[in-house]
Amino acid sequence: MRTGLFRKEVIDEQSNAVDGRFLMTPKPVYSAIAGLLVVWILAVIIYLNTGSYARKASVSGWLEPNHGVFKLYADARRGKVLDVLVSEGQLVSKGAPLIKINYSSDDASGNKVSTQLLAELEAKQHRTRQSIQRLDVLHRAQRQGLEEQLSQAKRALTALDAIVELSQTQWALALKQWEKAQTLLNQGHISQADYENHTLQRLTAEQQLTLAQKDQNDEKANIAALHHELATLPQQQANEMANVENTLSDLTQQIVSHKSNAEETIYAPHNGVISGLQVKAGYTIDSSRPLLTLLPKNADIQARIAVPVRSAGFLRKGQALHIRYDAFPYQKFGVQSGEIVNISPSLVLPGELTDIPISISEPAYLVTATLNTKEILAYGNNISLKAGMTFSADVDLSQRTLMEWLMEPLYSITGKL
């Protein structure tokens, strides 16, 4: 039973075409265009996978020696330069005097107040030294006087010892005669008057002995007192001398303090070369500006960079630095290279660094970089880079292919950035 519109024989007949199937071929120009499109697409894919793009951060910085620079300032008081003992570019040693400064003021007559006060203190110091000399002479005289008194007392004691011995002999003889007279009186051989005369002689001898012994004891006490005075004299004299010497020491300290306050000499803190000498004799100065800068001798120049916090996230050691010096326009002298070698872990806030040649207007990290060259070729001459030169620079934060940059949104989503 037939199910279709046409018979089966009709359909089979249609499949047996005499001339074969109809095929439309493209024109040659279309083939060329298609080939070019394929080549272009392949080239784009290769370029996206081989070409790279560096993410950069623009920063600013300055040059300084690797050991830093020393900027020397005057005291906070207002003063005047008395003398400048060095010159620009001079090599100085540690401890060498550099500048003399006077801080004294003038009175109504135009005289230096510090000079007058210093003269008074020095005069008082001179008088105190003379007092010490006189006191030393007086101390020697006191000791000699006591020693002489002791010698005299000893001689007097020797004489008193002889007198006491003689008085004892006289008293013993008078006592013996009195006892004999008493016996004779009892026997009736002498009168009462003779006995009383012997009694008076005994009493007189006894009185003389008592007086001689008293003088002897007094002289012994005097000698003991002299010995004690001689023993304590050195300590007493030392105390007196110490009081005067303390007064002299106080005056000396006042003079030193006055000289240091009225006049100051700036000394070199280390070996180096004088640079940036800004004062001359007679200049009025204060602590608001440096007197000079001391550069270490034969120090390597390095770059110091202030990298803002917003650009420091991908900062690391070894990253390349492309430097454009302000003193050498890069349009003429090209861009110089460097490499980051150190990144400060602490943050620097605006206003914390006051002795740098650039302005920091936002929180930043200080970065140290080495320079590939310390000289700039300018008009056929090699010009050395100097400390304090400022520059702007670009830091290569990251290097990725163009394909990675195009796929960054996908990487961000998957967390593989």
Image (tube, rainbow, N blue to C red):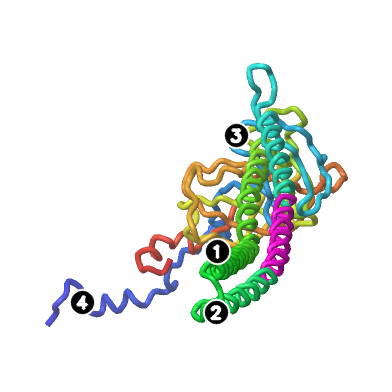
Secondary element at image label 1? loop
Q: CA distance from mark 3 to mark 4?
A: 124 Å
Quick one: 11 or 48, which is closer to the camera? 48
Q: Label 1, on which residue?
A: 316
Mark 2 or 3: the one toward you: 2
Q: Is residue 159 magenta?
A: yes
Q: Label 3, on which residue?
A: 77
**Which numbered tag is attached to residue 184?**
2
Secondary element at image label 4? loop
How crowded pointer 2 is (Cα within 10 Å; few <14, some 14-19, many 20+) is rated as some
Which stretch appears magenta? 137-161
Residue lying at the far top of the rendered structure = 109
Above or below: residue 262 compared with residue 242 = above
Q: Name the N-terminal-most of marks 3 and 1.
A: 3
Residue lying at the far right of the rendered structure = 380
Q: Label 4, on which residue?
A: 7
Quadrant position of the C terminus in the picture: bottom left
Q: Name the N-terminal-most of marks 2 and 4.
A: 4
Q: Residue 398's image quarter?
A: bottom right
Query: Looking at the image, do the residues carrying marks 2 and 3 touch, with CB atoms under 8 Å apart?
Result: no
